[in-house]
Amino acid sequence: MKKTISLLCLLACLAALPAQKSASRYTFRRPNQTDASSGIDSRNVLKAKAYVGYLIPNTAYARLDIHRPVLGVELDWEWRPKGKYYWEKYWLYPTIGIAALGLDLGHPDAGQLFAVYPYLHWNLAETKNFNLGAKIGAGIGSFTKNISCGSYFTAMIGAALSGEVIVDYNNSVMIEAGYNGFDNMNLVAPGYFTHIPYATVGYRHQFGGYYHKPVSRFIKSPQYQLLVNIHGAFGLREYPFHNADFAKCFTLHADVMWKITDIYSLGPGVDMFYDGAFVQQGADNNGNVYDKYTYSRKYYIPEDSEANKFRVGISFAQALMLGRVTFLLDWGIYVYDPVKNAYPSDNMDNALRRNFFYKYRVGVEDGWNYFRLGARVRLIDNLAVQVSVKSHLHNVEYIEWGLAYTIPMRRYLHYDQRTRRFKQIQVLHPGGDGWD
């Protein structure tokens, strides 16, 4: 009887081995305790990618008449967290990486661009043969020709979505689509951006054997399902294309966010902007130039009026909440914009009369839509500091520095340890502030 039982147990273990090996091959988990204590480590990953992009023309690059794409290579080195630090758990155990990028900008006078930047990468979805991921990063760049950003050295931001076709445990083929932006680091005139949307194709190699991926547990993000956010900010802006005087700018924003996953929320918002740069400028019917504030004549504003300095918009707001840090992306359209008819034209005697949506010249006019890209860091309970960039497509208007206050609704979410998701429960008094 003992021999029979032993034989059956041995057969059961042998039958289970292929399934365990197959699962660990694609989920990066060690199949048994022997491998877990063997010292085999696959935390390190190398990626090599061929890069092709498009250099969006700004004031400097438009003069070069560039017809070739941006070409280059990128090398990435990544390592996975072991769960040793609390921030790794806080941010859902992202893969940590550092990238080296070298680009040719498509014209001899544009030169080359080199950059180094650290980044974080998350797998959004995993299957047996394909992984979908996202990454964000920031670093420094260097131009060989100083014609755009006003400096050879610049700051850099980047974001991308990636797809990984798994060949075997150690090797994958990768595709990626994303955006890289380079700025001159001028806080009051950040408009000299170099913008490069891009795509890559490459190869990924994972070193070593099995990797034990930490299990994501409770995340200290807001436990309320419905959130009302109020944001007030201040900024400085140069009078358009002038190097002497600066105008004060103010922003007031409010939105209602619905938390559709543990870390992602979205909802409608409303914005009110005050821009002190909209002062008397342009020319009158007799050809007299109003150049008290600017010689660029970007706006045709023949008289000073406080009404010209206000704009109101409605927006689609999104938030990625990772612990105390929230990343923001808003897209809005103006519903009140008195300066939309104030851009220079061939016939300055007649003011332009535009519809709600209209075709406009990027780089010359602000247009009917705007974007906000920013980050918010929660200080205590519902109060947070926020920094964001307001732009019209790829033209940055000014940097917003401000405070944000979140009003959580009474719909309290309880974290289910079994499913690792929030579920709604009805409570009258949840106790505490509901954030931790």
Image (spheres, helix red, strand yellow):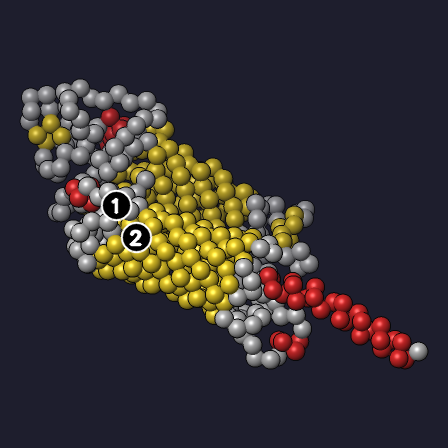
Image quarter for residue 283?
top left
x 46%, y 59%: residue:
121
Can I make out residue 40 in this image?
Answer: yes
Which three-letter amino acid code belongs to the residue tagged 1? Arg
Q: Which residue is mark 1?
A: 68
x 71%, y 69%: residue:
17
x 57%, y 48%: residue:
261
> Is 67 in front, or is 248?
67
Q: Relative to 164, does residue 170 appear above or below in the rendering?
A: below
The disc placed on residue 71 is 2
- Residue 242 percent location from the top left of the image: 14, 43
Q: Secondary structure at mark 2?
A: strand
Q: Tag 1: Cα neighbours inside 10 Å, few (<14), some, or many (≥20)?
A: few
In the rendered view, does 224 fall on the left or right side of 181? right
Q: Secondary structure at mark 1?
A: loop
The disc placed on residue 174 is none
| Image quarter in which the N terminus is found | bottom right
- Residue 59 percent location from the top left of the image: 19, 42
- Residue 380 percent location from the top left of the image: 47, 58
Q: Are marks 2 and 1 in contact (CB under 8 Å)?
A: yes
x 35%, y 60%: residue:
74
Can I make out residue 222 in this image?
Answer: no
Q: Relative to 349, does residue 248 appear above or below in the rendering?
A: below
